[in-house]
Image: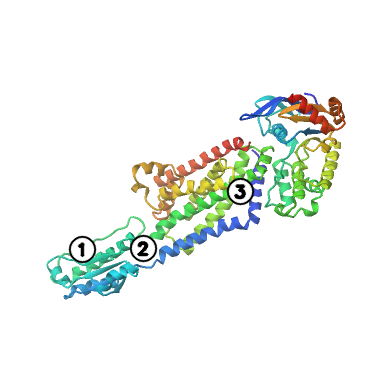
């Protein structure tokens, strides 16, 4: 092993990037665009419009309507009963709630029965409307003559808090995913170019050892990936203000491991592609299962048992778990679960390095 | 080991699936000579050259380069290899390419000399993707010889090169050979073969004849190398 030769390969890679504006944009502009969009979408999403029809002859209907109008989950609009269905059809509201003339009367006898008409094709929007209604109905508790039972649960948060939102949950995982995805794509294509332009053959006919080639590539790409990781991290924490209760250096360390995994997986898989098109075919194969199964969107514990086995062998599962543990739960290295996550990701890195170096000679011919 | 032999190929065979790329080839290249490998496309020239740089492990037989039996990584320090198409990094400048190949062969300096040797010093800052085919070929040659190898293997270096540049290339090969570099060059162009000190005629992975151009012509009893090649190839087949 010669440090000088390894450095020559790493330097060559970086010199190549310097003139390759498109790749630079993919590595350094794309993450900001993706994360920026995600942040804007999740933080500034508009609330679904819900129609309100108050026909109640008593006082309680308007109490609930006032509560609905104050809800942050929906945008309450008053509609006429006859227009309700038409508005559902044209999409201007996702649901409408009717308080019938006998609403107050029945409520006195303990039956609270508003009619909820739901558009139905968008489960999420309908759920929001129902949730808002349920919260609004609580206001009846105080308005109902004779008092009754007060429902006032006290909620204590182990991690996070009431202000933790969807972006905080996804943002932590997205940091890992974006670094993994972009570094993987750039590595697999660059390494493939090395083969298709014939320079790999030249390298193999030089005194370079296989390990030196893989290490040189690893170092070159890792430098790029680390710069990208810093950029993504600063953007998430300083601009998107994604919740973080952990150590920033620890997050960076996990991102770096993620990048190393992606680089080595890219080198390894490029051995099995002959053209760039074949390399591109690996992208959905590697990325889609990891997006679905690594717990980014749906918690792994909630998957059917058979899929959980699959999740358990994906590197991103551990990285996402580690990132969430640190950023949301404030985990540090003394946490057993975090130690395991980090050890597993490091294990993937080593496995891919060995696999990459082993297949290099065989696939050159 | 004979000091006067740069490359000793002994009974080398190599199959790729059903195709016999090399079939018991034996030949010796002497130090300081220009040895031409002559044969049609698909004859096995590239396979032979790749087995001399250790890119291919023969199924049987041995290859000895500069006194050491392959596979041997260290011996590659003394070997320069120019592939058929100019294998360069298109995003790097001419100078960066040559510097890179110097570095991976463990040498410093020599970049300027190599670039001057192929007349590219004035274009050293140009990015390779902007160069003409001939300039790329010259840059590729500079990359192959920047570490001053004792043995230079050139796989059809003049394919796609205009006649003027081809003459320049051969002029350079002769200068290098005069300085003691051993050169093995493959070609399917007969007039290039005349410029070699010795030739190996290859077809269907077998060595048909070996010797100086005059010896090869005498052996076949013909006036030109082209006729000699056709006659020798015909004899083998019948």
Question: Helix or strand or loop: what does disc 1 sit on?
Answer: loop
Q: Which residue is mark 2?
A: A163
| Residue under the point 54% across and 38% down | A355
Q: Is residue A115 left or right of residue A266?
A: left
Is label 3 on the same chain as label 1?
yes
Q: Residues within 10 Å of mark 1 (few under 14, many from 20)?
A: few
> Dividing the picture into quarters, in which one does residue A168 lie?
bottom left
Q: Chain of mark 3?
A: A
Q: Nearer the viewer, residue B10 or B187?
A: B187
Question: In the displayed structure, would residue B147 be above or below residue A142?
Answer: above
Residue A280 appears at what percent x and percent y?
54, 48
Q: Which residue is mark 1?
A: A151
Q: Is residue A32 left or right of residue B203?
A: left
Instruction: Inspect this view and state whether residue B93 appears.
Output: yes
Q: Is residue A343 left or right of residue B36?
A: left
Is label 2 on the same chain as label 3?
yes
Q: Residues within 10 Å of mark 3 (few under 14, many from 20)?
A: many
Check contact, mark 2 vs mark 3: CB within 8 A: no
Instruction: Find the distance from the CA under tag 2 to the CA under tag 3.
Output: 40 Å
Question: In the displayed structure, would residue B64 be above or below residue B132?
Answer: above
Question: In the displayed structure, would residue B53 be above or below residue A328?
Answer: above
Q: Chain of mark 1?
A: A
Q: Which numbered disc flags the more N-terminal residue, 3 or 1?
A: 1
> Dividing the picture into quarters, in which one does residue A125 lie?
bottom left
Q: Residue furthest front?
A: B238
Residue A220: assigned label: 3
Q: Nearer the viewer, residue B50 or B152?
A: B50
The C terminus of chain B: image quadrant? top right
Q: Chain of mark 2?
A: A
Instruction: Find the distance from the CA under tag 2 to the CA under tag 1.
Output: 22 Å
């Amino acid at each position: 092993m010669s440090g000088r030769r390894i450095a020559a390969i790493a330097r060559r890679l970086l010199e190549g990037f310097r003139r390759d504006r498109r790749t630079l944009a993919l590595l350094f502009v794309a993450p900001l665009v993706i994360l920026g969009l995600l942040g804007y979408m999740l933080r500034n999403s508009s609330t679904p419009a819900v129609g309100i029809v108050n026909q109640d002859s008593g006082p309680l209907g308007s109490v609930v309507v006032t509560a609905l109008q104050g809800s942050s989950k929906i945008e309450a609009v008053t509609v006429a009963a006859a227009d309700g269905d038409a508005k559902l059809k044209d999409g201007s509201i996702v649901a409408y709630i009717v308080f019938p003339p006998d609403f107050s009367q029945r409520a006195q006898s303990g039956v609270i029965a508003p009619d909820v008409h739901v558009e139905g094709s968008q489960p999420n929007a309908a759920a929001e409307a129902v949730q808002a209604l349920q919260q609004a109905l609580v206001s009846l508790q105080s308005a109902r003559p004779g008092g009754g039972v007060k429902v006032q649960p006290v909620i204590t948060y182990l991690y996070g808090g009431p202000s933790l939102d969807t972006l905080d949950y996804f943002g932590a995982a997205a940091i890992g995913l974006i670094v993994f995805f972009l570094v993987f794509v750039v590595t697999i294509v660059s390494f493939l170019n090395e083969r298709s332009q014939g320079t790999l053959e030249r390298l193999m006919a030089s005194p370079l050892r296989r390990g030196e080639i893989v290490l040189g590539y690893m170092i070159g790409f890792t430098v790029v990936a680390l710069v990208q990781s810093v950029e993504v991290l600063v953007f998430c924490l300083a601009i998107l203000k994604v919740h973080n209760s952990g150590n920033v250096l620890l997050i960076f360390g996990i991102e770096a491991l993620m990048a190393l995994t992606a680089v080595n997986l890219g080198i390894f898989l490029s051995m099995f592609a002959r053209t760039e098109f074949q390399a591109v075919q690996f992208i959905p194969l590697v990325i889609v299962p990891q997006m679905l199964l690594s717990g980014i969107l749906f918690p792994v514990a909630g998957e059917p048992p058979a899929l959980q086995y699959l999740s358990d062998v994906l590197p991103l599962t551990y990285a996402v778990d580690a990132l969430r543990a640190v950023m949301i739960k404030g985990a540090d290295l003394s946490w057993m679960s975090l130690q395991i996550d980090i050890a597993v990701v490091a294990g993937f890195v080593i496995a891919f390095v060995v696999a990459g170096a082993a297949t290099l000679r065989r696939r050159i011919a | 080991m004979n000091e006067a032999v740069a490359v000793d190929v002994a009974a080398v065979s190599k199959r790729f699936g059903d195709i016999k790329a090399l079939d018991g080839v034996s030949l010796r290249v002497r130090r300081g000579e220009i040895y031409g490998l002559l044969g049609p496309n698909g004859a096995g020239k590239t396979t032979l050259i790749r087995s001399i740089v250790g890119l291919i492990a023969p199924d049987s037989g041995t290859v000895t380069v500069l006194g050491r039996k392959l596979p041997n990584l260290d011996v590659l320090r003394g070997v320069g290899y120019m592939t058929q198409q100019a294998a360069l990094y298109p995003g790097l400048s001419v100078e960066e390419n040559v510097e890179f190949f110097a570095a991976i062969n463990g040498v410093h300096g020599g970049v300027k000399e190599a670039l001057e040797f192929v007349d590219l010093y004035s274009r050293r800052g140009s990015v390779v993707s902007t160069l003409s085919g001939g300039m790329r070929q010259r840059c590729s040659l500079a990359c192959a010889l920047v570490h001053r190898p004792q043995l230079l293997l050139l796989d059809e270096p003049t394919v796609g090169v205009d006649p003027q540049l081809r003459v320049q290339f051969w002029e350079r090969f002769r200068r290098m050979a005069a300085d003691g570099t051993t050169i093995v060059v493959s070609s399917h162009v007969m007039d290039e073969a005349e410029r070699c000190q010795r030739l190996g005629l290859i077809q269907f992975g077998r060595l048909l004849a070996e010797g100086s151009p005059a010896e090869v012509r005498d052996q076949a009893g013909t006036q030109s190398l082209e006729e000699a090649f056709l006659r020798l190839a015909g004899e083998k087949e019948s």
